[in-house]
């Protein structure tokens, strides 16, 4: 394997960046992870390390527009027009994204920074000071941090799809690994999450020995406790197994059955159609602060952001999720080559304090119910799939479906529910359209619309490998 020089890894609320593809410059006098060498890990140091991991995880999601906005544009949910920045249209709906631009190269370094920061934390745990943590607390920490790593790898492969991604060396953060293809990456994530679950089981009734951000403790469950971390872990694993089950290149029906088991555990054991709507908002969240030293807003709070008119024309009459759609200034057809105009946006897209600090669900129960419906569809259990889908749609004023007679009808229904329940909460619709083979059936948004299904490997990563184009991934 090749190696490349890492930047210093700083500790702090936005710390622990350490890879050549990192775009930021860290202060030279920052504390370094190297300073832990030969010194026992203390509880206070673990707090700083864990805070850094979670800060970088959030930064991967909202630190660039890729994950939340550009993927939504490709998924026919959003439009963003900026006279001074045409790449929001040009590199999503007119041409392929450039790996050297924010459009093509985003949603990459931030997630790897979090993964590498997590590796540094995990590698420091065996050197804990005597009595700093109990063995159970150590296992709880390992299980939680590995779950966050699995979450970040999942996001990377959601964005890169068949392009593939590197799997970071767990010991040496300087190692430049080969680019693995989608199937082995999903298999790796599944194994990592299962390892995390084993750690959590060994932790018993312990709690984490560090304080989590408030978004992990105030939305229905406290994810400081092992019991709830296991629910989160199985939720992420269930989503990964749904991705494996519906993978258009290598679908696996066996993974659908696994996903049902995992998602049912994450939902507290509730049967199909029986998850109460009062828990739909439960889950870990990102919180945002627009003032002070943090100054990190929810990046969907963007006055230039519009919704694709397909969002409004596709809405069923009586669906109360239509309240998420409001009128806005018109983007006219012809602007930057767009074929279709729009005059709508999302109710939480304006740049005001409420929207900028609006919490963002990481993986909440409403999504888990619909993911389980997708898994039931893949197993051919249309009765259970219909029950889960109806448990969501009837909350929003719509009549329940009769049991689906065909797989195509069930897929169309679950894609609809996910589009409106999770509107502008991530790339879910884009991923669904891509995996179900529906993306290219959508209308063209520009004359040269390439129906982009993936982002490229970032230019700094390619440069580190002395490459100019995406390498062939390793099966």
Image (cartoon, helix red, strand yellow):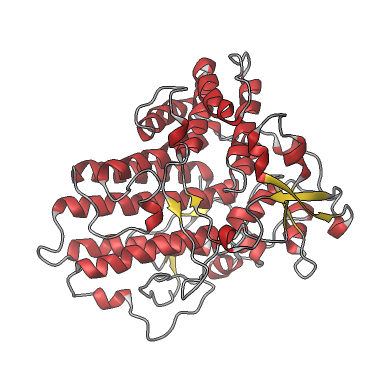
User: Residue 133 location, x and y as percent?
Assistant: 15, 59
Quarter of the figure that contains the N terminus = bottom left
Residue at (14, 53) in percent of width and height: 135
Residue at the limit of the structure toward the left, as seen here: 130
Quarter of the view holding residue 246: top right
In the figure, 430 relative to 104: above or below?
above
Give the left or right position of residue 76, taking residue 27 as reference. right
In this view, the residue in front, 38 or 329, is 329
In this view, the residue in front, 190 or 367, is 367
Residue at (54, 73) in percent of width and height: 23
Give the number of marks: 0
Q: Can see residue 345? A: yes
User: Residue 465 location, x and y as percent?
Assistant: 54, 66
Residue at the limit of the structure toward the bottom, as seen here: 29
Quarter of the view holding residue 471: bottom right
Residue at (72, 29) in percent of width and height: 317
User: Residue 175 location, x and y as percent?
Assistant: 41, 65
User: Residue 464 location, x and y as percent?
Assistant: 53, 69
Residue at (65, 21) in percent of width and height: 409
Give the left or right position of residue 27, taking residue 106 as reference. left
In this view, the residue in front, 466 or 455, is 455
In the figure, 20 relative to 224: above or below?
below
Q: Can see residue 107? A: no
Quarter of the view holding residue 270: top left
In the figure, 47 relative to 423: above or below?
below
Residue at the limit of the structure toward the right, as seen here: 334
Give the left or right position of residue 95, taking residue 256 as reference. right
In the figure, 65 relative to 380: above or below?
below
In this view, the residue in front, 417 or 190, is 417
């Amino acid at each position: 394997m090749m190696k490349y020089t890492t930047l210093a890894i700083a500790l702090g609320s936005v710390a622990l960046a350490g890879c050549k593809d990192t775009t930021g410059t860290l202060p030279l006098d920052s504390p370094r992870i190297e300073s832990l060498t030969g010194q026992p890990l203390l509880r206070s140091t673990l707090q700083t390390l864990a805070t850094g991991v979670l800060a970088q995880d959030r930064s991967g999601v909202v630190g660039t527009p890729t994950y939340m906005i550009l993927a939504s544009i490709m998924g026919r949910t959003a439009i963003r027009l900026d006279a001074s920045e045409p790449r929001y249209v040009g590199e999503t709906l007119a041409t392929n994204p450039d790996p050297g631009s924010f459009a093509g190269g985003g949603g990459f370094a931030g997630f790897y920074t979090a993964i590498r920061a997590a590796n540094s934390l995990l590698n420091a745990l065996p050197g804990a000071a005597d009595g700093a943590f109990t063995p159970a607390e150590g296992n709880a920490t390992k299980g939680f941090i590995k779950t966050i790593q699995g979450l970040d790898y999942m996001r990377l492969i959601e964005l890169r799809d068949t392009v593939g991604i590197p799997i970071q060396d767990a010991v040496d953060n300087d190692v430049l690994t080969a680019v693995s293809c989608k199937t082995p990456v999903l298999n790796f994530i599944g194994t990592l999450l299962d390892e995390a679950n084993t750690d959590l089981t060994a932790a018993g009734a312990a709690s984490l020995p560090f304080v989590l951000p408030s978004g992990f403790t105030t939305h229905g469950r406290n994810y400081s406790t092992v019991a709830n971390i296991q629910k989160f872990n199985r939720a992420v694993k269930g989503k990964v197994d749904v991705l494996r089950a519906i993978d258009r290149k290598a679908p696996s029906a066996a993974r659908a059955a696994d996903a049902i088991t995992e998602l049912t555990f994450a939902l507290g054991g509730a049967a199909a159609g029986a998850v109460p709507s009062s828990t739909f908002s439960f889950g870990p969240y990102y919180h945002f602060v627009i003032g002070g030293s943090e100054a990190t807003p929810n990046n969907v709070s963007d006055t230039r952001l519009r919704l694709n008119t397909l969002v409004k024309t596709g809405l069923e009459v009586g669906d109360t999720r239509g309240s998420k759609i409001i009128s806005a200034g018109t983007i006219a057809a012809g602007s930057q080559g767009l074929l279709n105009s729009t005059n709508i946006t999302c109710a939480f897209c304006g740049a005001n304090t409420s929207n900028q600090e609006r919490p963002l669900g990481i993986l909440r129960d409403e999504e888990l119910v619909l993911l389980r419906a997708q898994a039931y569809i893949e197993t051919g259990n249309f009765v259970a799939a219909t029950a889960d889908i109806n448990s969501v749609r009837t909350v929003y004023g719509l009549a329940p479906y009769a049991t689906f007679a065909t797989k195509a009808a069930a897929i169309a229904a679950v894609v609809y529910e996910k589009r409106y329940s999770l509107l502008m909460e991530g790339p879910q619709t884009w991923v669904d359209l891509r995996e179900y083979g529906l993306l290219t059936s959508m209308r063209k948004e520009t004359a040269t619309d390439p129906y982009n299904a993936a982002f490229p490997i970032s230019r700094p990563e390619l440069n580190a490998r002395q490459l100019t184009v995406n390498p062939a991934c390793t099966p």
